[in-house]
Image (tube, grey):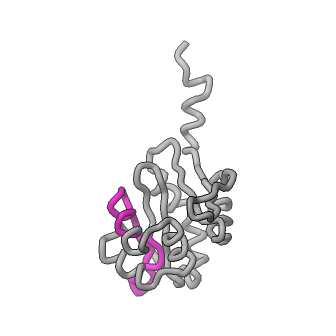
Amino acid sequence: MPRFRPAVTGDAYWVNRHLREADRQETIALGLEPLAAILMSLRAGPSWVCVDDAGFPFALFGQGDASPWMVGTDDIETNWRWFLRNTPEVIRLVQGDHPLISNAVDARNTRHVRWLAWAGFTLDRPITSPQGLEFIPFHRRHPCASQALGPSSRPA
């Protein structure tokens, strides 16, 4: 059965060698070489990997400065049921104790956009990159953050 574990540098090299084309195109659209982008993200903060039954990585994700990120291999398709069932854990891990997490996704990557919406992220109006490509900013507030700001949390 697939599982999560903390990511290590070797996972970045594995995922890069087997990177989904959509993820490769998104990193290039940001003006980054894919391996450099993955390693930079891995070093930016906590990160995890989803590994299959044989222990091979199929998704790498994390967050740095409350900015969630994820890349994967085509094997995410093989493990899609497990991945969707475990999406709440992915969100819990990347949200951590941050009241707000946000980033942007390449608008061409409609599968990622649909997953973000399904996972409970709010999608904002698209923005255009300097290269003329559309990116969709997204964010998610921690469920407890809105309660902490409510009237009952104010001092009397």
Judge by depth and name the residue closer to the eye, 49 or 45: 45
Which quadrant holds residue 35?
A: bottom left
State the residue lying farthest toward the top.
156
Q: Position of residue 156 (x, y in %)?
A: 55, 12
Q: Is residue 119 magenta?
A: no
Judge by depth and name the residue closer to the eye, 3 or 62: 62
Q: Residue at x 63, y 58 (%)?
A: 128
Q: Position of residue 67 (x, y in %)?
A: 47, 53
Q: Residue at x 47, y 79 (%)?
A: 58
Residue 83's place in the image compared with 124, above or below, is below
* Magenta stretch bounds: 38-60
Judge by depth and name the residue closer to the eye, 86 or 19: 19
Q: Position of residue 121 (x, y in %)?
A: 62, 54
* Left or right for 153, reference 115: left
Q: Position of residue 39 (x, y in %)?
A: 35, 68
Residue 2's place in the image compared with 41, above or below, is below
State whether residue 1 appears in this view. no
